[in-house]
């Protein structure tokens, strides 16, 4: 696990874009896209590189982490719409190659299994972008999630519903249930890139990176993974006990070694 602490949110966005760009330029890539506000800057930077530096996503496939139950894919509040508006429509990624769990499927259990199989059939995710919830969730794996869980239904915590109320007309409109990739599913991606910015994420980041591996902080599941980059601004890193060591290790990183 590599913890990268950077001086500004712009630096975070550029660094995450660098990781995605190198995977995309290497060949047909399977991208794991996170929704939420945190990765939007990195998506904007990737879109700029698409426009100005010939970065093409035409051969990519993408999978989303999660979707609300009872919200149609086409609805304004769906995560599919969010990623379409904030990334897919800004680049040359074919919308037909972007997959999200169907939160309106008649048989949600079957849909969850189908989604896991679709990721496997695509060859697995090359690079998975991740945000982190203020309660430590990863995807929508709320506290108490099995560390080896597969895609399934989860009930959102009140904290998460409050955090996401800004995307809905009223807080009561935030659904209670979601279909989310499990922690086991997420951890099958070959490279996890967890992004956090702002002081509101500092406790969750500290618990995920330095706390015990525990279902109480689902994002701590990243500690199992052999290739994780945690990319933070100073505020999000402010509760890390080993922050100075992470900075030093990053400065000493051999020039030939990428994240
Ligand atoms: P945010 O959400 O990026 O909007 O803070 C992150 C998350 O809930 O995983």
Image (cartoon, grey):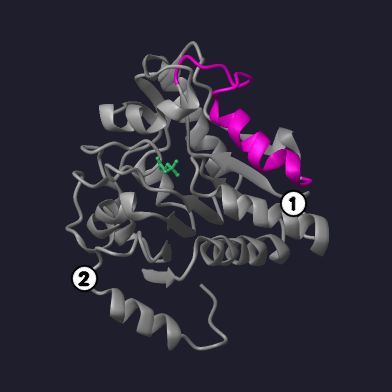
Residue 248 drawn above or below residue 159: below
Residue 200 numbered tag: none
Q: Position of residue 247 (x, y in %)?
A: 37, 79
The image quarter containing residue 4 is bottom left
Q: Position of residue 258 (x, y in %)?
A: 54, 76
Q: Position of residue 172 (x, y in %)?
A: 37, 15
The residue to which callout 1 is attached is 57
Disc nearer the start of the sequence (2/1): 1
Q: Quadrant of the N terminus?
A: bottom left
Question: Would residue 25 appear left or right of 167 to someone viewing this image?
Answer: right
Residue at the (74%, 60%) spot, across then down? 49
Specify whether residue 221 is in view: no
Residue at the (33%, 51%) spot, across then down? 201
Question: SS for tag 2?
Answer: loop
Q: Residues within 10 Å of mark 2 (few under 14, many from 20)?
A: few
Question: Would residue 144 appear left or right of 247 to someone viewing this image?
Answer: left
Q: Residues within 10 Å of mark 1 (few under 14, many from 20)?
A: many
- Which of the four quarters of the rendered structure image does ligand 1 lie in? top left
Viewer-proximal residue among 33 and 29: 33
Residues rendered magenta in the picture = 69-92
Question: Would residue 63 appear left or right of 4 to someone viewing this image?
Answer: right
The residue to which callout 2 is attached is 241
Q: Residue furthest top?
A: 106
Residue at the (33%, 37%) spot, across then down? 141
The image quarter containing residue 205 is bottom left
């Amino acid at each position: 696990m590599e913890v990268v602490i950077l001086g500004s949110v712009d630096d975070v966005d550029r660094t995450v874009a660098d990781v995605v760009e190198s995977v995309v330029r290497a060949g047909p890539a399977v991208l794991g896209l996170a929704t939420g506000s945190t990765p939007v800057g990195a998506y904007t930077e990737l879109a700029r590189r698409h426009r100005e530096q010939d970065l093409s996503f035409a051969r990519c496939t993408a999978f989303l982490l999660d979707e609300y139950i009872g919200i149609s894919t086409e609805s304004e509040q769906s995560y599919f719409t969010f990623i379409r508006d904030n990334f897919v429509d800004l680049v040359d990624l074919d919308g037909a190659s972007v997959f999200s769990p169907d939160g309106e499927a008649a048989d949600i259990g079957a849909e969850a299994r189908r989604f896991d199989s679709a990721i496997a059939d695509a060859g697995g995710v090359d690079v998975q972008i991740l945000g982190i919830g203020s309660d430590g969730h990863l995807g929508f794996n709320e506290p108490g999630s099995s560390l080896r869980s597969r895609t399934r239904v989860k009930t959102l915590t009140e904290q998460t519903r409050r955090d996401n109320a800004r995307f809905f007309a009223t807080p009561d409109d935030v659904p209670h249930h979601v279909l989310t990739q499990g922690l086991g599913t997420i951890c099958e991606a070959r490279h996890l890139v967890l992004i956090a910015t702002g002081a509101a994420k500092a406790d969750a980041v500290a618990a995920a990176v330095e706390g015990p591996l525990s279902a109480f902080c689902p994002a701590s599941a990243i500690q199992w993974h052999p290739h994780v980059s945690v990319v933070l601004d100073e505020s999000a890193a402010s509760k890390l006990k080993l922050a100075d060591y992470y900075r030093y290790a990053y400065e000493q990183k051999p020039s030939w070694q990428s994240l």
